[in-house]
Image: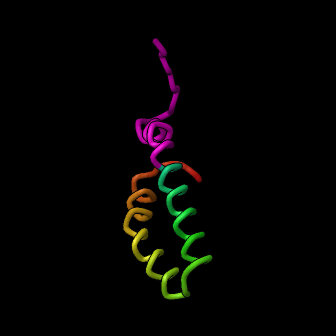
Amino acid sequence: MLELKIKCESPEEARVYLNALQYHSLISDMYIGLRNARKQGTDADVVMFVDNYMDDLYKAIENSEGAY
């Protein structure tokens, strides 16, 4: 059994730490997709890729309370 204690000043700060894995996954997915679009696609493919991820990126930023 593993017990993890996080000492934070506020619930918002704790949420940042608890969601870190999700943020990392989002950034990793974006990196891989953007890299492939740049390598194998056109400029239009890159723009389309960025447009597809913007909503997820905005949600992650709006729900974050910490500095990144």
Q: Position of residue 42 (x, y in %)?
A: 55, 86
Vertical placement of 37 versus 9: above or below? below
Q: Nearer the viewer, residue 10 or 15?
A: 15
Residue 53 occupies quadrant: bottom left
Q: Position of residue 22 (x, y in %)?
A: 45, 46
Residue 51 occupies quadrant: bottom left
Vertical placement of 22 versus 39: above or below? above
Residue drawn at the location 39% of the way across and 62% of the way down: 56
Q: Nearer the viewer, residue 45 or 22?
A: 45
Residue drawn at the location 45% of the way across and 59% of the way down: 61
Q: Position of residue 37 (x, y in %)?
A: 54, 75
The residue furthest front is 40
Q: Nearer the viewer, residue 30 or 38?
A: 38
Q: Nearer the viewer, residue 35 or 7?
A: 35
**Residue 39 inside the magenta-drawn segment:** no
Number of numbered tags placed on the structure image: 0
Q: Position of residue 41 (x, y in %)?
A: 54, 82
Residue drawn at the location 50% of the way across and 33% of the way down: 9
Which region shows up in magenta? 1-22
Residue drawn at the location 42% of the way across and 42% of the way down: 12
Vertical placement of 40 versus 67: above or below? below
Vertical placement of 8 versus 52: above or below? above
Q: How was this image coloured?
A: rainbow
